[in-house]
Amino acid sequence: MEKMSRRKFLKLGTLCAAGVSAAAIGASSVASAATTATTGTYQKNVKRLKGTAMGMVIDMREIDSEKIAELQKVCHAFHNVPNVPNEKDEVKWIWAEKYVNLFAGETTERLAEKFADKDFVALCNHCESPVCVRVCPTKATFTNDQGIVLMDMHRCIGCRNCMAACPYGARSFNFVNPRDYLDEVNYAYPTRMKGVVEKCNFCAERVAVGQLPLCVEAAGGAISFGDLNDPESKVSKLIAENFTLQRKINLGTKPKVYYII
Ligand code: SF4
Ligand code: SF4
Ligand code: SF4
């Protein structure tokens, strides 16, 4: 992996020092920060996507392994997720997972056989009752008023309680300096440092300015995003009209990512 030049590193350092992580900001201040971050200029009257329980419906009938790789590429490139080659130190916000791992204990033998070779999309479930938030001693991870579970990297002390608590393996720890493993740096989004935890933020920086998450856009209709509390939203209608699965619902975390299989 090519290391960053000193000039690139200094520029990055300045950005990080100046920028409070968009992923880390609460809902009220995300809008202006994200607008500045994604466009470089401040826009007045930017409206964020509405909703108090943002969730996702993934139609796995429309998604294959290549598509998942594409989703990961756009998400990781935008959010400066490091590409650490060593699997032990891997950092991931969205990834491919086998059906039996995703829905362990909630499947039938027939379904497990049917989907044995198929890759499924995995990401943070932005749980309504997130254990990760409950166990964090510094409030570095928290839920905003749209039900999105976020991280404040500046508060994270790297204790990894949240990783141990999350039943979905949705969080990654930066065992190595992530800035050494970025092929390209996206200066519109903060980078992280060694010793902190990170995960999917439901593209809060985009939601704050009225845009859909990147993976939703890249999936071309196969992933829907919206307010689960609104019965008229597309996600609510999809859930009402289709057979859907959530991961490990018996644990009581109330995941907000639904799968049509
Ligand atoms: S999936 Fe894990 S990290 Fe995400 S909100 Fe639920 S418990 Fe927390
Ligand atoms: S690793 Fe960071 S986010 Fe996770 S519980 Fe510890 S302080 Fe909180
Ligand atoms: S919602 Fe955004 S942050 Fe989460 S996996 Fe999709 S693109 Fe990545």
Image (cartoon, helix red, strand yellow):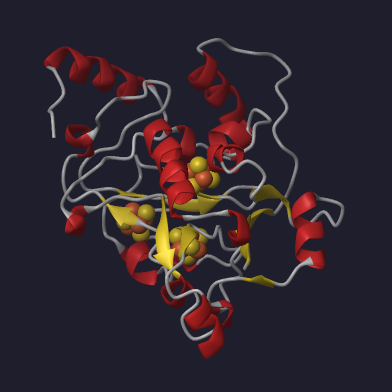
Q: Is the C terminus in the top left, top right, bottom left or bottom right quadrant?
A: bottom right
Q: Nearer the viewer, residue 187 or 156?
A: 187
Q: Position of residue 85 (x, y in %)?
A: 18, 47
Vertical arrangement, residue 99 with respect to residue 3, above or below:
below
The image quarter in which residue 17 lies: top left
Q: Position of residue 47 (x, y in %)?
A: 73, 27
Q: Position of residue 63 (x, y in %)?
A: 55, 54
Q: Is residue 133 visible?
A: no
Q: Nearer the viewer, residue 261 or 3?
A: 261
Identify the residue at image location x=30%, y=25%.
Answer: 185
Vertical arrangement, residue 28 with respect to residue 233, above or below:
above
Q: Is residue 193 left or right of residue 30?
A: left
Q: Is residue 97 left or right of residue 175?
A: right
Q: Position of residue 103 (x, y in %)?
A: 50, 76
Vertical arrangement, residue 175 with respect to residue 112, above or below:
above
Q: Is the N terminus in the top left, top right, bottom left or bottom right quadrant?
A: top left
